[in-house]
Image (cartoon, rainbow, N blue to C red):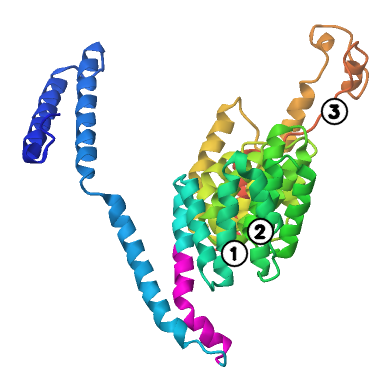
Amino acid sequence: MGLLVDEHRSEFTRICDEGIQLCLHQWFRLPEIVTESHIPLLQAFQQFVELQEASQIFHSLDNKPLAKILRPVAWRQHVFSAINRTYIPLIQSNLGANTQSFAYRGHHETAWMVNRFAHVARKHGLSQLCKDSLTRIYTLPNIEISEAFLKLCEQAKVHFENPDDLGSGFEVISHTNLMYFGPSQKSEFHTIKAMFLARLNLHEEASQVFNQAVSTDFQYPKAWAQWGAYQDKLFEKSPENLQLAAGAVNCYLQASGLYKNGKARKLLIRILWLIGMDDASGTIGRAFDSFKGDISVWNWTYFIPQLLSCLSAPREARYAKALLTKIAKAFPKTTIDELFPQKQRAYNAGQRGGGAPLNNSTNHENNSSQTQPASAQQGGPPNTSANPTQNVATLPNHPPQSITPPGPFPFEHADDIMGTLKTQFPS
């Protein structure tokens, strides 16, 4: 560590490299199977890694990266101040609104810079720096509506991240005049307000404000996504309330259809998980069936392996088949490359599983023959009834049982999808 000064930096690097090479030579002398004799070498490697990291930290103190970051910010402020000193005296009362807006361009750019700096500070967890930066916007004589909206959003978000500031953040939102904002901006502001209400455990008011947010702008995906996440969290706390899961699936489907980027993918994988939690009556599945909006087929292609695995699950099979059919119609080559090997594996697994039948009628007959009473198999009196379940009903503590034929096998679903592909793409 004494060689970390500037004049001995090359010597420090050389010694570290030689030490690493010696450790590597000793490592290759040991057997391939890791044993207790490898542990001292692993500890030595870790010490060399820490030495190199310490060297980087020691030398980065001289670089002063913070000053390099703040230097462009200060330069932008200097340039915008020069622009303002030149343009502001030229503003006359008889000029039009567009000309006056152009004259305040320096203040507009300064507001953008302040909002951006506050956003980065908030992302790095510097809440107080974010708040101090946002207060500078009040010193500007003229800013655009969009910059004022971003300032309010950043101010609300920085309060939302601190549990002790929830009250003050909600007060800021409640006293904001939304008259000058557009529909999407109003929808986002209502969404943030609903998130505050949810954190304050005011669930009834939060649901109403979420509804107001999506009603203000039905095409705003963030409102749908946050409403779905809110219902998803409530479902995690109350797993017996499947209506919350159904509402979350509906919101996630709406948001995924409106998003035009990768943000939809984390919602889609959550939809698959929620459908797997469905009950026998299909409470969650009905939300999927009743959805009439756009399905983001392109984003679903990332989950083709998961959808193929869902074909083996009784609850998700029907929905996975519907999604795979839509994907196959839009991207046939991608679907075939994933579907054909999965179909062969499912078929082989069905054949190995005790001679699994290929159709439902054969399986139904086998299940019916297995429900004969034990007395008939052990030489007892024969059953005179045509329905074998009546004999089971006469036994104590044995309620009548209904025989339900099982659903299709996974390779049968794959055959249906392949048939759809052959019909649409004969070649």
State the image coordinates of residue 318 (x, y, percent, origin top left). Answer: 68, 45
Name which residue lies at 93% across and 21% down. Answer: 385
User: Which label lies toward us, 2 or 3?
Assistant: 2
Considering depth in this image, is 352 or 154 the residue closer to the camera? 154
Amino acid bearing label 2: Phe
Considering depth in this image, is 236 or 126 the residue closer to the camera? 126
The numbered mark at residue 402 is 3
For the N terminus, which image quadrant?
top left
For label 3, the crowd category at 10 Å Cα-Cα, with few meaning under 14, some 14 to 19 and many 20 or more, is few
Name which residue lies at 71% across and 46% down. Answer: 197
Label whose residue precedes the other's in the sequence (2 or 3): 2
The numbered mark at residue 149 is 1
Q: Read off the magenta span.
A: 95-113
Q: Cα distance, mark 2 to mark 3?
A: 54 Å
State the image coordinates of residue 144 (x, y, percent, origin top left). Answer: 55, 72
Q: Residue furthest top?
A: 379
State the image coordinates of residue 309 (x, y, percent, origin top left). Answer: 57, 39
- Badge 2 element: helix
Mark 2 sits on what residue?
189
Q: Is residue 145 above or below residue 272?
A: below
